[in-house]
Image (spheres, rainbow, N blue to C red):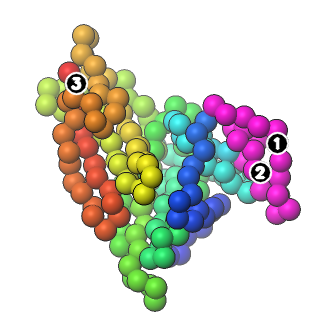
Amino acid sequence: VPVKGSSWRRRKGGRLHKTGTTTTTTTTTTGCSNTLDHNDGHTITDKTRQFKTCEPVRKLPRCRYFRDVTWTFITYPDNVTQQVMHCVCPRHAVAYIIKRQAYHSSRGLGFQYSFACSPQSKLRCQRKEPCRLFTVKKRPQFEDVNTNTLCQCPHSHTCPAHHTDPGVIPGKTYTEDSIRTYSGYCM
């Protein structure tokens, strides 16, 4: 899979660290930051996740809304994953999946997911229109849940915050990756 950018890998059972936790700054012998501090110059924060890069974040270009692929998530047949950062979303933007592509290698079948940036919408939701999308990946001991807010609910209505809340309808399932999508509607 030919991709360019700053990348990291995680083995089966690896987990992203949540924001809000800080430690003292440390670096490895390769110059990559090991700290959970989001102000270390090597961290891209997306809602409740931190993505660490070995190169300084300021060296990555700023993404354009809807046009640029901000990052690519690659799953390999041996259950290793890689995330490649191409550019940084503007402040208060949200990343959403724009493309899912299967590929074949000598080791088997893998998938590449591309994400783009969208401004957080202030638009009011229309009747029968989802207000939030959820992407849930089942892991052996937990679920990775990504949310994308599409619009704001009308006055006196609320948008479900979790994929298990009332007002959420299951969507498409990608069984080979243990991923399921859900749509949340104003209640």
Q: Residue furthest front?
A: 141
Q: How far apart are the two marked residues, 1 and 2, measured between alpha carbons?
A: 7 Å
- Numbered range of the magenta stretch: 20-42
Q: Using residue 181 as the reference point, say whether residue 46 is left or right of it.
A: right
Residue receiving disc 1: 25
Q: Quadrant of the C terminus?
A: top left
Residue receiving disc 3: 186
Main SS of the magenta part reads loop
**121 w.r.t. 171: above or below:** above
Q: How far apart are the two marked residues, 1 and 3, measured between alpha carbons?
A: 42 Å
From where the camera sits, is residue 134 visible? yes
Q: Is residue 130 magenta?
A: no
The percent position of residue 150, horizontal first and vertical second, equals 32, 34
Kind of residue at disc 1:
Thr
Q: Earlier in the sequence, mark 2 or mark 3?
A: 2
The percent position of residue 8, horizontal first and vertical second, equals 63, 61
Asked whether the beta carbons under mark 1 and mark 2 sit within 8 Å of each other, the answer is yes
Residue receiving disc 2: 33
Which of these two is toward me, 38 or 129? 38
- What SS does tag 2 mark? loop
From where the camera sits, is residue 124 visible? no
Q: Using residue 28 as the reference point, say whether residue 166 is left or right of it.
A: left
